[in-house]
Image (tube, helix red, strand yellow):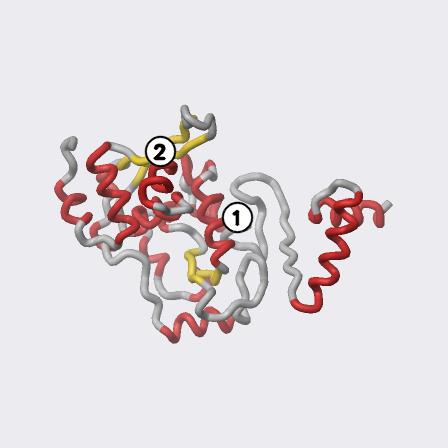
Amino acid sequence: MSEVDPKILEMAGKLGKRPRLVVEHIIKHGEVSTTEINELYGYGHPPRAARDVREVGIPLKTTIVKNPKTGKRNAVYTFDDLDKLRLDILKGRQNFPAKFRKKLYDKHDNKCAICNAAYSNRELQIDHRVPYEVAGDNFDTFALEVDLYMPLCPSDNRNKSFTCESCPNWLETRDPTTCQTCYWASPENYEHIATRKEKRAELVFRDEELDLYDIVNEDAEKVGESVGNYIINLIKKQKN
């Protein structure tokens, strides 16, 4: 084991299971890859495990390399500038008071802020609109103000985590204002998606609408298109 900042050694024993295993692996080997997080520790969404480490105040650097075995791109995590070590948030992600959770869920009608589908309170997850990793030391922005958070379904929470960690702003600039104008932070009014000039529409078919989806899906398959592309082409045809 290479020499490690004693503050990290002290913190490692106080972390939850998922971030602790990531930190201990880096302490022992100097780095940990998404493949190792998945194969050694059984975490199917490695970026979420790395995010857990960052959210307890331990900075990580992400390097994208090609896996020599599979040829696929693979993220490798190492400790970043330890001057950014945040001992004051060792408590990890916040345990939100019941009143705050209810206020947030009521504001969004118990719907995911991204896909706009309704979920139970148990299924919804609270997420910072602007990730702590980008907001950095401006920790006051994470006061319990409803507008600074968004309820997400588990699927969109994973998608947001993956997209954010691949975003140029996350990897390089880390400008909070760029996040604030991103789809993943402000789906109600945004200028880009992870710095790319794109627009996105989420469609969720439920209950009696499932029959409608089956019809659209069948028509899309007949012309060899995805449902999304088929709907876009229908709109284009109507405009013409």
Could you say whether the residue bearing mark 2 is in a helix, strand or loop?
Answer: strand
Q: Dot 2 surroundings within 10 Å: few (below 14), some, or many (20 or more)? A: many
Query: Residue 134, how many percent across, how many down?
Result: 38, 45
Q: Residue furthest top?
A: 68
Could you say whether the residue bearing mark 1 is in a helix, strand or loop?
Answer: loop
Name the quadrant containing residue 129.
bottom left
Residue at which label 2 appears:
76
Which disc, if any, is residue 60? Answer: none
How many callouts does the rendering have? 2
Q: Please report the residue visible at 46 percent of the width from the left and 38 percent of the height from the top.
A: 166
Nearer to us of marks 2 and 1 is 2
The image quadrant where one finds the N terminus is top left
Instruction: Give the Cα separation between the discs numbered 2 and 1.
Output: 25 Å
Q: Please report the residue visible at 26 percent of the width from the left and 37 percent of the height from the top.
A: 79
Vertical position of residue 150 compared to residue 228: above or below: below
Query: Residue 223, how many percent across, how many down?
Result: 79, 42
Using the image as rendered, state which of residue 25 and residue 113 is in the foreground. 25
Q: Dot 1 surroundings within 10 Å: few (below 14), some, or many (20 or more)? A: many
Using the image as rendered, state which of residue 39 and residue 16 is in the foreground. 39
Marks 2/1 in contact by CB < 8 Å: the verdict is: no
Residue at which label 1 appears:
182
